Every structure is written in C-alpha cells, then in structure tokens.
C-alpha cells in the first residue's frame, strides 16, 4: 500500500450570507432569469424573479409583492434555484437592485420568517 505524501493546500471561503443558527428552510423553484446568490426573489408566474424598483427619482418604490425568499446560489435562466424561506442573514450581503436598500425589504422578509442582521 502506498501513501500520497505530496503537499496539498486546502482552503475554505466563509459564508457571509447566513448570519445565525436559526432554522433554515429551503425550497427549489425554476428561475425566469439569471439571478445572483443573496438576491431577494419573488414568484412571478411560478418562477423566481428579482425584486423590482420603480420611480425615476427618490423616493423609489421597491416592489415586494410576491416576495418568496433569498436565493441560496447563483442560478441561470431556466435552471432550478434553491431559495431560503427562513433563517437569519446579513443585510449587507444581500444582492439588491439599484436604488433598493436592505431596509426596503427588511419588514417584508421578516413577515416570511427571514431576519436580517
């Protein structure tokens, strides 16, 4: 029996999206567009879509109608994506559209069982 004595380097990247040890519940849904990990998503026609912002100047309106959760991983259009439905997450790790803030989605996410820190 031989041993592999070659030097190996291992590393990990910390997950800065998940903020606590609250129970995390997930679901899988198809994405209607390419979406980034950490994006709050809505269900539109049964598929995942990014939240939208309307208005040409401040104050902007963030549309959270149909808010479903936070995307757990990058996903391409037409692929199944994992969505966090509950848990604790870092607000500054969210991927939000231009002119949207974590404060805009904090209360709607809390109503789903998702808490921002």
Image (tube, rainbow, N blue to C red):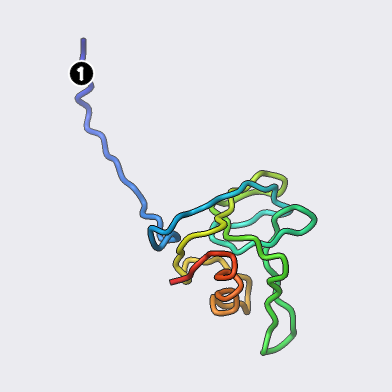
Viewer-closest of 76 and 17: 17
The quadrant of the picture occupied by the N terminus is: top left
Residue at image position (66%, 48%) is 76
Residue that label 1 marks: 3
Question: Against 8, is 4 above or below?
Answer: above
Considering the numbered disc 1 on the image, is that residue within a helix, a strand or a loop?
Answer: loop
How far from the left and from the top, in percent, is residue 84?
55, 55
Quarter of the view holding residue 10: top left
The quadrant of the picture occupied by the C terminus is: bottom left
Q: How many numbered marks does the figure carry?
A: 1
How far from the left and from the top, in percent, is residue 91?
48, 71
* Residue 113 left/right relative to 20: right
Quarter of the view holding residue 68: bottom right
Residue at image position (55%, 74%) is 106
Question: Against 4, is 38 above or below?
Answer: below
Quarter of the view holding residue 49: bottom right
Label 1 environment density (alpha carbons within 10 Å; few <14, some 14–19, many ≥20): few
How far from the left and from the top, in percent, is residue 29?
67, 48
Question: Against 1, is 37 above or below?
Answer: below
* Residue 89 left/right relative to 33: left
How far from the left and from the top, in percent, is residue 74?
57, 51
């Amino acid at each position: 029996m031989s041993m592999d004595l070659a030097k190996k380097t291992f590393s990990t990247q910390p997950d800065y999206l998940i903020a606590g040890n609250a129970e995390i519940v997930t679901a899988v849904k198809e994405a209607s567009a390419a979406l980034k990990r950490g994006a709050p998503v809505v269900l539109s026609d049964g598929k995942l879509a990014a939240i939208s912002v309307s208005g040409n100047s401040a104050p902007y309106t963030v549309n959270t109608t149909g808010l479903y959760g936070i995307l757990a991983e990058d996903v391409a259009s037409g692929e199944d994506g994992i969505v966090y439905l509950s848990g604790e997450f870092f607000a500054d790790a969210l991927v939000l559209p231009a002119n949207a803030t974590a404060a805009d989605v904090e209360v709607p996410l809390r109503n789903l069982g998702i808490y921002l820190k």
